[in-house]
Image: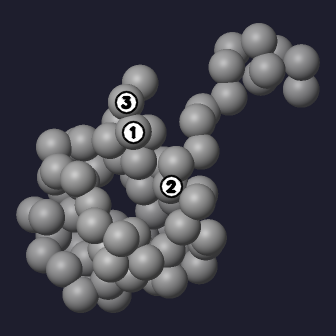
């Protein structure tokens, strides 16, 4: 999984965990919904400025966007 995919997966997960629609998050982060959609698809790279805006709205540390998903063996142990 490349970093764009990791970022996209975490962005979608964090947005859904907050119960926000793409429209709501895009509005709060001052970007277009279509741009946010492309980020969530992994089609675009996010600048540090965008990462900062998204992290602030979602109330997470920017590093949360780059955390690798737990492997199946890690999840099975829990």
Q: Is residue 48 above or below residue 5?
A: below
| 54, 19: nearer the viewer | 54
Separation of disc 1 and disc 3 at Cα? 4 Å
Residues tagged 1 and 3 counted as in contact (Cβ below 8 A): yes
Residue at image point 54% right, 67% down: 62
- What residue is pinned by disc 3? 2
Query: Which type of secondary structure does the marked residue at label 2 adopt?
Result: helix
Q: Residues within 10 Å of mark 1 (few under 14, many from 20)?
A: some
Residue at image point 79% right, 20% down: 74
Position of 65 with respect to 12 (left or right) is right
Residue 75 position, x and y percent, is 77, 23
- In terms of image quadrants, where is residue 47? bottom left
- What residue is pinned by disc 2? 65
| Whether residue 31 can be seen here | yes
Residue at image point 22% right, 63% down: 36
Q: Quadrant of the N terminus?
A: top left
| Whether residue 18 can be seen here | no
Q: What scheme was used to colour the molecule?
A: one colour
Residue 20 position, x and y percent, is 42, 70
């Amino acid at each position: 999984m490349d970093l764009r995919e990791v970022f996209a997966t975490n962005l979608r997960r964090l947005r859904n965990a907050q119960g926000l629609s793409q429209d709501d998050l895009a509005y709060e982060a001052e970007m277009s919904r279509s741009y946010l959609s492309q980020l969530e698809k992994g089609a675009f790279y996010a600048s540090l400025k965008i990462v900062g805006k998204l992290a602030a709205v979602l109330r997470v540390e920017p590093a949360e966007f780059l955390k690798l998903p737990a492997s199946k063996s890690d999840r099975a142990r829990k």
